[in-house]
Structure formats: structure tokens, C-alpha cells
Amino acid sequence: MSEQMDKVVKETYRYFYVDGLVETAVGLLFAFIGLVLAGWAEFEQGSWLLKTAVIILPILIIGGTFGIKWLVGSLKERITYPRTGYVAYRPGEPNNKRWLLPLFAALLVLLMFLFPAWLNKMAFVQGALLAFILGIIGYRVALARFYLSAGIAFAIGLLATLFVANEVMGSAITFGGTGVLMLLMGLIVFTTYLRQHPIPEIS
């Protein structure tokens, strides 16, 4: 009975990810982080540009997190619910912690600048922790594509640590690579969803 209930709960939670909008939005944000970090890799250590970046990037990421939360909700109302219906979750469900992923990214970027001694391992730490969070989401909703994202995030972080000499660029590759992966995967899921679920005609 407990296993059956757990299956029902996971299927209900999984509906939130059926359209791929969450992955698309988070992937865009991560790709943006990677792009900005790639630019900052050229900043001189201790320059005012780098110090300004320490303050601005976490603010942008946190603002982007709340922005994509609103955007995903708005798109679901316009695209998803008219096609496959609305599911009312209790507060905190199916998993409000999904929005901790971009917030966690802001913390990792901030730590990267506050503790430069960690820089030679930061890409690996970022990849491993992103993989952990994506894996947890995959387990909670029983979706294999999150496990795939987790594995690739871990691999990107490891390879960036081993083969990219510039540590900030390694972080840029970790976030940017994971973001592009999630973006592409989300778009594939989204286009498949639209094709399989056209808006019902009103007679």
C-alpha cells in the first residue's frame, strides 16, 4: 500500500515537469551564468570590475530565480493547463525546493569569489553539487532525464577541473554546459508535449 501511494505521489508531482518548461527556464538562467562568468574570466584579480561582479551576479541570479518562477507559472496557465488540465498542489508541493537550484548557483558563484583558494576545485564542486540536486529531483519525480542531466553536470565539472587552466572559465563551462543541456532537453520535451497535446477544439 505504501509503495502504491508513493507511486501515485510521484506521478502527481511528475505532472509539473511534463511540459519541460522548468528545465528550459533554469537552463536559460544557467547558460546566462556561464556566459557572464566566461566574460569575467578576463577580469584582473582585484579589479573593480571583479569586485562589482561579486555583488551584482548573485543579485541577478536571485532576481532571475523569482523571475523564472513567475514566468513558468504564467506559461503553464497559457499553454499547459488548457491542454492537459490544472493540478492544485498544496503549498510547498510538488517540490518548492526546485527553485533552490538557481539560488544555490548564486551561492556557489559568490563562494568562488569570496574563497579564491577553492578555485582550483570549484568547477568540480559545482558540477558535483548540481548533479546531486538534479539527482534528488529525478528521484522525487521518477524522471530519468534528470538523472541524465545530473550525470552530465558531474562529468562537465570534472572535465573542466582537469583540463581547463583558468578556474573561472572552468566554472563558466560547468554552468554553461549544464545550462545548455537542460535548455535543449527542456525544449525537446516542450515541443514533444505540444505535438502530443494539441488544444482541444471547442464544439
Image: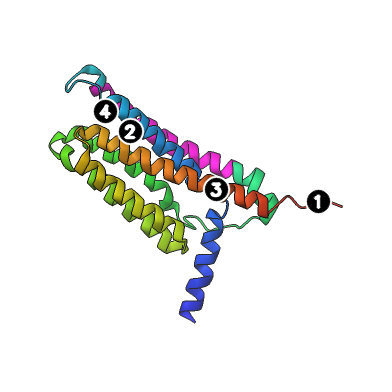
Q: Measured from the top left, where is residue 109 in percent x and y?
A: 28, 36
- Tell me which colouring the rendered structure shows: rainbow
The disc, 1 or 4, on the residue closer to the chain's N-terminal end is 4
**Which amino acid, mark 1?**
Glu
Query: From mark 2 to mark 4, how far is it between C-alphas?
Result: 7 Å
Q: Which mark is in front, 1 or 2?
A: 1
Query: From mark 3 to mark 4, how far is it between C-alphas?
Result: 34 Å
Instruction: Categorize mark 3 by other alpha carbons within 10 Å: few (<14), some (14-19), many (20+).
Output: some
Q: Which mark is in front, 1 or 4?
A: 1
The answer to whether the residues at label 3 and label 2 have Cβ atoms under 8 Å apart is: no
Q: Which mark is in front, 3 or 1?
A: 3
Q: Measured from the top left, where is residue 76 in percent x and y?
A: 61, 46
Query: From mark 3 to mark 2, how far is it between C-alphas?
Result: 29 Å
Seen from the viewer's position, the closer of residues 8 and 147 is 147
* Badge number at residue 54: 4
Query: From mark 3 to mark 1, how far is it between C-alphas?
Result: 25 Å
Instruction: Categorize mark 1 by other alpha carbons within 10 Å: few (<14), some (14-19), many (20+).
Output: few
* Badge number at residue 188: 3
The disc, 3 or 4, on the residue closer to the chain's N-terminal end is 4
The disc, 3 or 2, on the residue closer to the chain's N-terminal end is 2
The disc, 1 or 2, on the residue closer to the chain's N-terminal end is 2
Classify residue 139 by image quadrant: bottom left
* Badge number at residue 201: 1
Query: From mark 1 to mark 2, how far is it between C-alphas?
Result: 45 Å
Residue depicted at 53% across the width and 40% down the height: 70
**Which amino acid, mark 2?**
Pro
* Badge number at residue 58: 2
Could you tell me if residue 144 is visible in this image?
yes
Seen from the viewer's position, the closer of residues 110 and 166 is 166
**Which amino acid, mark 3?**
Ile
Q: Which residues are magenta?
A: 50-74
The answer to whether the residues at label 2 and label 4 have Cβ atoms under 8 Å apart is: yes
